Image: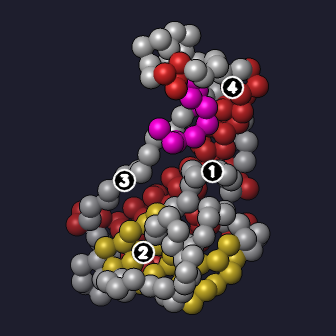
Amino acid sequence: RTALIGKYLNGYGKDDPTYVPPGWDEWYAKPGRYEYYNYDLNENGEMVSYGSAEEDYITDVLSRYATDFVDRAASEGQPFFAYVAPTAPHSPAIPAERHKDAFADEEAPRPPSFSEEDVSDKPVWVQELEPVSEQEASRIDERYQERQESMLAVDEMVGSLVEELEATGQLDNTYIVFTSDNGFHLGTHRLRHGKKT
């Protein structure tokens, strides 16, 4: 039994937001961009709209679908696979209301490579970058805080899934794999906010 819950592929839903690829028994995919509120989900081929209420926060909605899937799949006694891909911490990283300002005093890491003074050993395009200004450093900190805050709901999602797996007797029979598709620039080597390199 298989389920996809969350992000599928970049550009998914552009041509047909109701498309469900073969091989999935259950499908709760988010077409479009990276909205945290006021978005649509393709729920098994039908588009469902969510608004701006607290309970519409995308990570919480995906979490409910994930734990419900585990509960139902485990009760059938068949092997199951859930691919759960939250939006967080993708920009614009918007935290759930309950997590706003949880990291308000945090500063992004400042390793020796932050706004690196001597970039003469770097590619020419990096050598041409100006050092990170105070204003840019402040914005890097803000984005870092927002990303951290948005991940608190993901942490809760993982906790809920582990609890559900334990409650259904499947935790010791389950592999949980965490992966990411890219890192993120936080001023290292003078590279501003982003992930392009």
Task: Say if 29 sits above or below 123 in the image.
Answer: below
Amino acid of disc 4: Ala
Task: Identify the element where label 4 is drawn.
Answer: helix
Q: Quadrant of the N terminus?
A: bottom left
Which residue is disc 4 drawn over? 137
**Number of callouts in the render?**
4
Task: Say if 12 sits above or below 157 in the image.
Answer: below
For the point 46% across and 58% down, which residue is it?
159
Q: Position of residue 55 (x, y in %)?
A: 69, 70
Callout 2: few (<14), some (14-19), or many (20+) C-alpha neighbours within 10 Å? many
Going from N to C along the chain, the mark reached first, 3 or 1, is: 1
Q: Residue furthest bottom?
A: 46
Cα gap from disc 3 to disc 1, whole angstroms:
20 Å
Callout 3: few (<14), some (14-19), or many (20+) C-alpha neighbours within 10 Å? few
Task: Identify the element where label 1 is drawn.
Answer: loop
Q: Position of residue 100 (x, y in %)?
A: 72, 48
Magenta stretch prevailing secondary structure: loop
Going from N to C along the chain, the mark reached first, 2 or 1, is: 2
Amino acid of disc 2: Leu
For the point 31% across and 73% down, which residue is it?
81
Cα gap from disc 1 to disc 4, whole angstroms:
17 Å
Task: Say if 94 sits above or below 70 in the image.
Answer: above
Task: Say if 17 sits above or below 91 in the image.
Answer: below
Q: Residue furthest front?
A: 124
Which residue is disc 1 drawn over? 91
Q: Is residue 25 left or right of residue 98?
A: left
Q: Disc 3 vs disc 1: Cβ atoms closer than 8 Å?
A: no
What stretch of residues is rendered in magenta? Answer: 186-197
Going from N to C along the chain, the mark reached first, 4 or 2, is: 2
Which residue is disc 3 drawn over? 178
Callout 4: few (<14), some (14-19), or many (20+) C-alpha neighbours within 10 Å? many
